[in-house]
Structures are given as structure tokens and as C-alpha cells.
Image: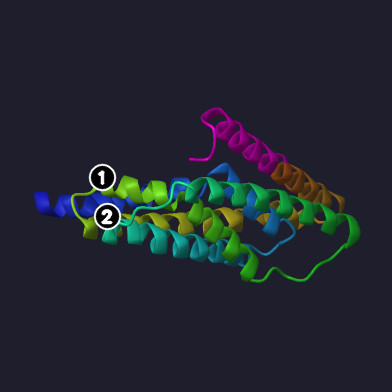
């Protein structure tokens, strides 16, 4: 019984924390800029699934290497990835605002953009999550189970969120345009805020190390 609970704990913990991880502000805002014009819940859910695949890919590749092979990541990786995410937020917001201002309609969102946005988010959190897995589990195998369940939970959570995001766009017209502009402005503001916080932290400790 004890062995079964030991094996089950990383599964439940990883799944629960992954679901919560999908709700992080930078994740929600970044994906919202991509699905802001999508009125179909299935299409929106597809975008969330693509984000989850990208997020899982880098999380499992980098975090899995840390857990299974005991790799030591460069201290520059996390701040560089976090800065990349901040710049992505600014770019996504600016692109969304420009699109609604200049083009009333646009092609459906493909899989590439949400995949790579998710990959950047996964890279930004992979080191810390791998260290958490090492600390919370008694073996490398259970650590990998934890990471896999975390990735699954984040993907399921994002699919659910993006499916819901399509509902405000069903009104269309001026209401839809206001939603797009609001999400785009929030993305730019959050991106600049994250970048400023990183710069302040680097200045305080004399660099990103």
C-alpha cells in the first residue's frame, strides 16, 4: 500500500500543479492573443493543445535530462528564457493590435505559433520544475513521471481555457474588436512589466547569474 501511494503521489501532484500552471498570467495572456478572434471552441482548443505540445516538448527534453542524467543547467538559461517570454508577449500583443486595426479578417491560426510560444514557456520553467521533481521524488523514474504528469496537466488545462476563451468572440463586430484590443494591450503591458522586473533583478545582483 505504501509503495502504491509512493508511486501515485507524483502522478497526482504533477497533474494538479500542471493544471494550475496553465493558469499562470503570462501563459493565459500569450495564448489569448492567439485565439482572440477565434469563435469556434474546437479551434480554440486546438490552439491550446498546440501550446501544450510545445510546452511539453521543452519541459520534458530539458527537465527530463536534468532528472534522468543529472545535467546541470547554465544559470543563464532561466533568465534568458524568461526574457524571451517577455519579448514574445510584447510581440504577440503588438501583432494582435495591428491585425484588428488594419485587417477586419485574418486566416485561421495554424499550429506553429502556439507550439513555439508554448515551447518558450516550457523552456523558461524547465530548470525549476526539474529541481522540484528531484527534491519531491525518491527516484529519477518517479521524477520523470512527475514531469510527464505536470506536462499533461498543463496541456489539459490550457485546452480547457482556450475553449472557453472563444465564447466572448461570438458577439463579433465592435465587441469582438474591443476584446482583441484589450487582450493585446494587456499582453504588451505584461511583457514590458516582466522585462522590467528581470532588468531590476539583474541590476540588483549585478547580472543574470
- Report how far apart the C-alphas of labels 1 and 2 lie in the structure: 8 Å
| Residue 46 occupies quadrant | bottom right
Mark 2 burial class by Cα count in 10 Å: few <14, some 14-19, many 20+: many
Question: Can residue 160 be seen?
Answer: yes
The x, y position of residue 62, in whole percent, is 41, 60
* Dominant secondary structure, magenta: helix
* Relative to 103, 5 lies left or right: left
Examine the image and state in which quarter residue 162 appears. Answer: bottom right
Which of the pair 48/141 is nearer the observer? 141
Which residue is more in the foreground, 99 or 43? 99
Question: Residue at (41%, 50%) from the top-left corner?
Answer: 127
Q: Quadrant of residue 34?
A: bottom right
Q: Are marks 1 and 2 in contact (CB under 8 Å)?
A: yes
User: Which residue was labeled with disc 2?
Assistant: 143
User: Is residue 1 visible in this depiction of the protein?
Assistant: no
The local secondary structure at tag 1 comes to helix
Say which mark, if any, is on residue 136. Answer: 1
147 on left or right of 174: left
Residue in the image at 60% along x and 59% along y: 117
Q: Point out residue 132 in the picture as x, y percentages from the top left corner.
A: 33, 45
Q: Where is residue 88 in the image (x, y as percent from the top left)?
A: 66, 53
Magenta residues (range): 189-209
Indicate left or right for 85 with 9 as reference.
Answer: right
Considering every residue shown, the one lying at the far front of the view is 206
Identify which residue is drawn at 81% across, 56% down.
Answer: 172
**Residue most toward the left?**
1
Disc 1 crowd rating (10 Å Cα; few below 14, some 14-19, many 20+) is some
Amino acid at each position: 500500500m505504501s509503495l502504491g501511494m509512493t508511486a501515485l503521489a507524483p502522478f497526482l501532484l504533477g497533474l494538479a500543479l500542471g493544471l494550475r500552471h496553465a493558469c499562470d498570467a503570462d501563459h493565459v495572456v500569450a495564448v489569448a492573443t492567439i485565439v482572440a478572434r477565434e469563435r469556434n471552441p474546437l479551434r480554440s482548443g486546438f490552439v491550446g493543445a498546440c501550446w501544450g505540445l510545445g510546452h511539453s516538448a521543452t519541459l520534458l527534453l530539458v527537465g527530463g535530462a536534468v532528472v534522468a542524467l543529472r545535467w546541470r543547467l547554465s544559470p543563464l538559461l532561466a533568465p534568458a528564457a524568461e526574457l524571451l517570454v517577455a519579448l514574445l508577449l510584447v510581440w504577440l500583443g503588438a501583432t494582435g493590435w495591428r491585425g484588428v486595426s488594419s485587417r477586419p479578417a485574418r486566416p485561421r491560426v495554424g499550429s506553429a505559433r502556439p507550439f513555439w510560444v508554448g515551447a518558450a514557456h516550457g523552456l523558461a520553467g524547465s530548470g525549476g520544475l526539474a529541481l522540484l521533481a528531484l527534491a519531491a521524488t525518491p527516484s529519477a523514474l518517479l521524477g520523470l513521471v512527475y514531469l510527464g504528469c505536470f506536462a499533461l496537466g498543463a496541456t489539459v488545462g490550457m485546452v480547457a481555457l482556450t475553449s472557453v476563451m472563444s465564447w466572448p468572440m461570438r458577439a463579433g463586430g465592435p465587441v469582438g474588436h474591443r476584446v482583441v484590443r484589450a487582450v493585446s494591450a494587456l499582453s504588451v503591458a505584461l511583457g514590458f512589466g516582466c522585462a522590467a522586473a528581470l532588468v531590476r533583478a539583474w541590476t540588483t545582483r549585478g547580472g543574470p547569474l
